[in-house]
Image (tube, helix red, strand yellow):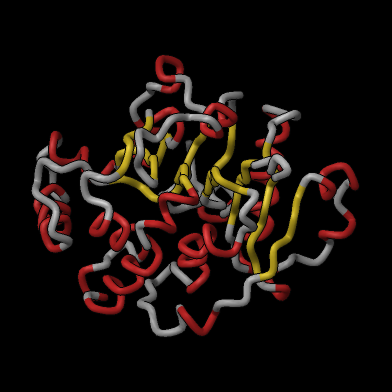
Amino acid sequence: MPHREYRAAVCLTPDARYFKAAIVVARSILAQEPDIPADIVILCDGSDVAPGYDALPADLRARITLLPWARSSEIAALPLGRHVTHAAYRRLFLPALLGERYRRIVYLDSDMVVVRPGLSRLLTLSLANRPVAAAIDMIFLKDFEDGPLTAEFRAYRAGLGLPLDRPYFNSGLLVIDRDLWREQAVTERALAFLAAAPARCLFHDQSALNAVLQNNWLPLSPRTNFMGDFQLLDLETRIAPIVMHFVNHPKPWHFRDWAGE
């Protein structure tokens, strides 16, 4: 039997609003690690591709694969939020839509920027026989603050069936073992939870993944997903983030919404 070469994929799943931002993420990955041993895959509908994509530098486009999205009917009835479109659910389908040659998938949200080398370490990181690795979300750490949102976020997590001491992860960066994800039917279980309890899924697919993956995910360093409120703590020099995640509004490209510092 001939030897099969397995590769890794770094993936984004933007809609039309976030396509340009996804290209910025891809460019930031290559700027930090030009020889990263992974294919960069953008899963999107043809109508999501921004005008001018073909005019981007040929060497950049050569590193990006546009993978057509064709599963819209399976997510059409899933809940939406004020800033969330159905494109948010596309990441759930990456293990099924990518070819079998990819055993390791690293998913990134399109409101991220890679600012240091190090993403490539996730391509070979041992997941300790778990299907996913992710960073703890800042709303879980609100428990240590005991501020105005603490009770709200505790009630939300309890509604997902999580004990208060059980960590809750952010799905903006996921390291996926494709084989284990599929063996454990993570996509199907998350979709079933979303369909059965949409009101409890305040953060959509992230909520469902936390509900079905309890005690079955590997925590990552906040360096890999330095999000939102973390950026207010003046810890960047000490922690040296690899990936900045702009979860809050305004996003870096919302120039008109920024005021002062």
In the image, 45 versus 19, the foreground residue is 45
Q: Image check: 214 left or right of 217?
A: left
* Residue at 70% across, 50% down: 23
Q: Is residue 49 above or below residue 118?
A: below
* Residue at 64% across, 57% down: 99
**Quarter-wise, where is residue 140 in the image?**
top left
Q: How many marks?
A: 0
Q: Quadrant of the N terminus?
A: top right
* Residue at 73% across, 67% down: 49
**Quarter-wise, where is residue 46 in the image?**
bottom right
* Whole-percent x, y for residue 182 in the image: 44, 58
Q: Is residue 42 above or below residue 175?
A: below
Q: Image check: 176 left or right of 205?
A: right
* Whole-percent x, y for residue 31 in the image: 72, 31
* Whole-percent x, y for residue 8 in the image: 62, 42
**Quarter-wise, where is residue 16 in the image?**
bottom right
Q: Image check: 124 left or right of 204?
A: right
* Residue at 50% across, 64% down: 93
In the image, 181 versus 156, the foreground residue is 181
* Whole-percent x, y for residue 235 in the image: 38, 21
In the image, 105 versus 46, the foreground residue is 105
